[in-house]
Amino acid sequence: MPRRNPKAKELTQTIAKQRMLKLISFSESAIRNGNLELSRRYSLMASRIQSHYRIRPSLRNKVCKQCKTLLVPGVTASVRLSSKNRYIVLKCLLCGKESHKVYKKQGTRTLGA
Ligand SMILES: [Zn+2]
């Protein structure tokens, strides 16, 4: 089996990342124009590209896991902070799916030299 050229892999990664970012921006502009179906289609394509080429950072906090809508704060998502449990609550306004992300505690910084 022939070995793949590492530079070619790098090139496909960068092209895939550019296309993913372009699809995300198209999706966001479609949401702002009120076309939710088109926006979902773009964000679904972007998340497929991201998972196929394993592009980091992932779209986990940008695309709803349930309905595949792009989460734009104030338009399709609400963002709240839970100070008691120290996590960010990202709620999809279309299907109601919530996702949580832990944020760093304050005061955990150590005082160095
Ligand atoms: Zn949703």
Image (cartoon, grey):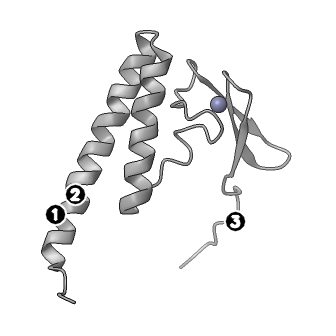
Mark 1 Cα within 10 Å, few/some/many (few <14, many 20+)? few
Q: Picture quarter containing residue 98?
A: top right
**Residue in the image at 33% along x and 30% along y:** 25
Alpha-carbon distance for marks 2 and 3?
Answer: 36 Å
**Residue in the image at 70% along x and 26% along y:** 95
Left or right of 81: which side holds 12?
left
**Upstream in sequence: badge 1 or badge 3:** 1
Alpha-carbon distance for marks 1 and 2?
Answer: 5 Å
Q: Secondary structure at mark 3?
A: loop
Q: Considering depth in this image, is 14 or 110 the residue closer to the camera?
A: 14
Q: Picture quarter containing residue 57?
A: bottom left
Residue 80 seen from this side: yes
Image position, residue 89 (x, y; %):
72, 39
Marks 1 & 2, CB-CB < 8 Å contact? yes
**Residue in the image at 67% along x and 22% along y:** 93
- List the single residue furthest toward the right: 84
* Position above or below: 62 against 55: above
Mark 3 Cα within 10 Å, few/some/many (few <14, many 20+)? few
Q: Give the labeled residue for mark 3.
A: 108
Q: Give the labeled residue for mark 2.
A: 14
Query: Is the CB–ligand 1 distance for label 2 below 8 Å?
Result: no
Left or right of 94: which side holds 9?
left
Image position, residue 44 (x, y; %):
46, 38
Q: Give the labeled residue for mark 1.
A: 11
* Position above or below: 58 against 78: below
